Image (cartoon, rainbow, N blue to C red):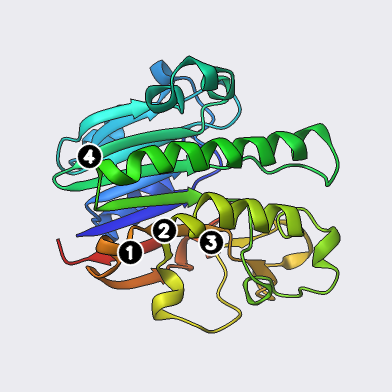
Amino acid sequence: MKIATWNVNSVRSRLDHICQWLEANPVDLLCLQETKVVDPDFPRAAIAALGYQVYIFGQKSYNGVALLSRAPLADVAMGFAAVLGEESAALDEQKRVISGRLGQLCVVNLYVPNGSEIGSEKYDYKLRWLATLRDYLKTLLPQHPYLLVCGDFNVAPEDRDIHNPKGRETHIMSSDAERAALRQSILDLGLVDIFRQFNSESDQFSWWDYRTAAFSRNSGWRIDHHYLSPALSLKAQNCTIDKTPRAWEKPSDHTPVIVELDL
């Protein structure tokens, strides 16, 4: 089984890229972030023509997540409130969380807030959102021994995940508070950063800024991740970053990350 995560930075702008990539890489499940479209306007027909079921949680111009699955998904749920109740409903005004079950596998697809600038209101929102994510995953883990959490986390966990970590303490996506929040919401629960189980090298990135020819210089960040529950991590066979779509004309600034599971 192959599962990919990809922040496409507008599903309508990148529809040809998505279809081209799926034709060459017919993964079982593709998790999209930043779809930037309300549900009625999602380009379902083009995706369905490739043999995929479509499950979406979108909003106009911003955010938005989707699951594209070859097989029908069960128990599809949108937002934190589906698990945590109404006390978390305010965070679901931004469409950032969707989950579903594929056989014995539970998949959670996330678009973590960027945070904008250290000390800003959006930064505080990001930290609050990650704290809620911890409560959400703590509830799901006992129910789903095979749990996969993927998406755009907007955090580089370690210095080797940044092309130049100098000054990273004052940079959004790599501040100490963000790294601590990611660790507390993910790794401290026992989830495994599965890419690092197969690749320990630096200079392995999934996002490159559009500015300053960052991609051609490989001046990137690894902020798109797959985290697996302990039992599921034993089923992992590989995890790779496919840089190919980032080199296409008018690409997303992110590229797909694929995990292979023996399921």
Q: Earlier in the sequence, mark 1 or mark 4?
A: 4
In the rendered image, which residue does mark 2 sit on? 227
Q: Is disc 4 placed on a helix, strand or loop?
A: strand
Q: Is residue 159 left or right of residue 97?
A: right
- Residue to which mark 4 is pinned: 101
Q: Amino acid at mark 3?
A: Arg
Q: Specify the quadrant that holds the N terminus.
A: bottom left
* Residue type highlighted by circle 2: Tyr
Residue sitting at the far bottom: 201
Question: Which is nearer the N-term, disc 2 or disc 1?
Answer: 2
Amino acid type indicated by mark 4: Arg
Residue 117 image offset from top left, x and y in percent: 82, 45
Percent x, y of residue 42 = 40, 25
Height in image: 16 above or below 26?
A: above
Q: Which residue is mark 1?
A: 259
Cα–Cα gap, marks 2 and 4: 16 Å
Local SS, label 1: strand
Q: Is residue 193 visible?
A: yes
Mark nearer the N terminus (2 vs 4): 4
Question: In whole angstroms, how far apart are the C-alphas of marks 1 and 4?
Answer: 16 Å
Find the distance from the CA under tag 2 to the CA under tag 3. 23 Å
Q: Earlier in the sequence, mark 1 or mark 3?
A: 3
Tell me the CA gap for discs 1 and 3. 18 Å
Q: Quadrant of residue 51?
A: top left
Dot label at residue 246: 3
Q: Quadrant of residue 140?
A: top left
Looking at the image, is 97 positioned above or below residue 155? above
